[in-house]
Image (cartoon, helix red, strand yellow):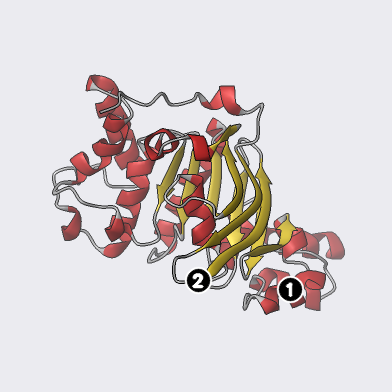
Amino acid sequence: MSGPQAVPAVQAVQAVPAVRVRGLVHVYPEGTRALDGVDLEIAGGAVVAIIGQNGSGKSTLARHLNGLLRPTEGSVEILGEDAAHLRVAALAARVGLVFQDPDRQIFARKVRPEVAFGPSNLGLRGAALDRAVTEALEAVGLGDQGGVNPYDLGYSRRKLLAIASVLAMRTPIVVLDEPTTGQDLRGVARVRAIIESFAREGRTVIAISHDMRFVAETFRRVVVMRAGRVVLDGTPAEVFSEPAWPVLASTYLEPPLAARVGARTGLGATPTEAALVEAVAARDG
């Protein structure tokens, strides 16, 4: 068995892109071409959302970032290293992935051992491990649930538990697949606060989401996928502006309500409610 994996310091990885994907193609064994020549570069410390209809290739792309899937063609670089030359264990020290369905990654009988599993595999021990687990559970609002069986938690809290498990690993790159699924407004706000804390620490955050309001209000860059390709890439104001609506419609996505109201009232690109209010104030001022 190999020893603990060294976790790259966040500050040390900003000089190279966190993720660089070139000509990425993935064909599943039954013949489905899930990725069809994806080119994508994400800078260290970026906060990026990937959106698109089911089957557009979002989750397939995410699973290439931590080695769960390998390219049929093309390449994936993580922090400047070709992922093809890295084992899954080495990639796990660099990329923490929260699955869309938390029940696919929860296996321990108690909450605290569940959260401790990942960081202990990365070499954390003793007080450092205890601190990482405690801080992660507190961040997701499960600080008093350490002795509870995960399956005694509701679905939304199991989702938060899965986020805590990756949070405790302190990887420089975090990938969240549908992080707000099953969350009420308080849960969504908690997830947003966690992402903002990642950004303050200089970590790279990549999230897959169908929640357009959450995307517009939380992320600085939005990548739109369709049929295994990137079809839009820009800021929320650019991706959700009226000229981009036909492309969004082709992916069965609609811009947030604030963007639609802003366009219909001649206020321009207003992807968030805050931007809409600001535009109204500027017009009326």
| For marks 1 and 2 on the same chain, the one whose residue lies earlier in the sequence | 2
- Viewer-nearest of discs 1 and 2: 2
Which quadrant holds residue 284? bottom right
Q: Secondary structure at mark 2?
A: loop
Q: Is residue 282 left or right of residue 208?
A: right
Q: x, y (%) of residue 240?
A: 72, 66
Give the quadrant of the N terminus.
Answer: top left
Q: Position of residue 221 (x, y in %)?
A: 67, 52
**Residue type, numbered disc 2:** Gly
Q: Secondary structure at mark 1?
A: helix
Q: How many marks?
A: 2
Confirm whether residue 241 shows in the render: yes
The image's mark for residue 100 is none
The residue where tag 1 is placed is 247
Indicate left or right for 90 with 231 as reference.
left
The quadrant holding residue 45 is top right
Q: Which residue appears at 44% of the width and 37% of the height?
A: 91
Which residue shows up at 77% across the image and 70% down it? 244
Residue 6: which quarter of the image? Answer: top left
Residue tagged by mark 2? 31
Quadrant for the C terminus, please.
bottom right
Question: Which of 24/119 is in front?
Answer: 24
Q: Please name whichever residue, 245 or 173, is drawn nearer the observer in this view of the structure.
A: 173
